[in-house]
Image: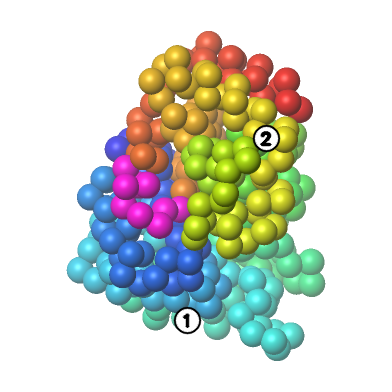
Amino acid sequence: MEFRHLGKSGLQVSTLGLGTNNFGGRTEAGPSARVLREALDLGINFIDTSNVYADGRSEEIIGETLAGHRHQVILATKVSSPVGPGTNQRGASRSHIMQQVEVSLKRLRTDTIDLYQIHFPDPGTPIEETLRALDDLVHQGKVRYIGCSNFSAWQACEAVWTSRALNLASFVTVQMEYSLLVRDIEREVVPFCQVYQIGIIPYYPLASGLLTGKYRPGETLPEGTRFATTPRFKDRFLTERNLALMDRLERFVNERGHTVGELAIAWLLGNASVCSVIAGATKPEQMVANVKGAEWHLTLQEMEEVKALLDRQA
């Protein structure tokens, strides 16, 4: 397993991370724990979750499984998504952040969260209030580094400049959806991150499973898969355009003895601003497959060839 710096921080994370939004939900506790243990055995040290995944059960499973192994991992979680019906049970206000960080610390059975991320922008809270609360948590030792998720380039830039102006802890990462099929962040977010040395953490790198090759035109959706259980993902990704691109990508990888799933991860890591690609898994063998992608180093020529294939579909 290889490692990269978490943005411009001194912390190093595995180039492949484990996403756990299925823990405690689509994947029950026992299988989730087996996936997490397999990840550790493979050398993965970056575990990403949120306080709202499976209503907090994801954090609990991670805390339970890591008992005695906390020192081996870099733990990342998030705050700002709704945790209840009340008006103050969501967002990035000081009140909500300070309340939820204690909940996450307890569930994760740890004294410190390595990367605490604002899950979604909160237009109802001034970014200064959010950053001052996060800065306090850093000084208290409850959080080591901070990041954001699903922020536009201008929102992330505003946060960075606010931190600079007020001498506050600054975001070191931006977590965004990014894959061979979803490249919106290349227009503004990627250039911003390159200039400001902000690490990119892609989620949904396998396009909710389409890039694994498990879905075929005209075939019944495999039972228990995300497309079978969540129609909105099927409707979004299982399109004629994407299936045509899959055909082109499969020819590319077959010539090189790889899979499209491996290409999906290797291609993202071809971007130097990407510090870790977080991929979910419901079975240990899926983690093994994902690691093969992280170990494949595309040449500059191969990166150009893939870009040409993608641009033909744009």
Segment tinted magenta in the rendering: 280-288
Q: Which mark is residue 251?
A: none
Using the image, tell me which numbered label, if any, was put on residue 103. 1
Q: Which quadrant would residue 24 be assigned to in this image?
A: bottom left
Picture quarter with the C terminus: top right
Q: Quadrant of residue 58?
A: bottom left
Q: CA distance from mark 1 to mark 2?
A: 40 Å
In the image, residue 247 lies in the stretch drawn in magenta: no
Instruction: Name the side, left or right, on which 132 lies relative to 87.
Output: left
The answer to whether residue 135 shows anywhere in this view is: no
Front-most of residues 14 and 21: 21
Task: Say which amino acid is labelled 2.
Answer: Asn
Q: Secondary structure at mark 2?
A: helix
Residue that numbered label 2 is attached to: 242
Type of residue at label 1? Val
Residue 142 screen position, x and y as percent: 43, 71
Percent of width and height locating residue 72? 26, 56
Q: Is residue 32 left or right of residue 221?
A: left
| Marks 1, 2: nearer the viewer | 2
Q: Quadrant of residue 124?
A: bottom right
Is residue 31 visible in the rendered image? The answer is: yes
Query: Residue at horizontal 66%, vertical 17%?
Result: 308
Q: Nearer the viewer, residue 121 or 215?
A: 215
Task: Give me the residue at 57% from left, 39% from top.
Answer: 216
Above or below residue 191? Residue 98 is: below
Q: Earlier in the sequence, mark 1 or mark 2?
A: 1
Which secondary structure, mark 1? helix
User: Relative to residue 88, is residue 264 drawn left or right?
Assistant: left
User: Do the CB atoms of the residues marked 1 and 2 lie less than 8 Å apart?
Assistant: no
Q: Is residue 159 above or below residue 59?
A: above
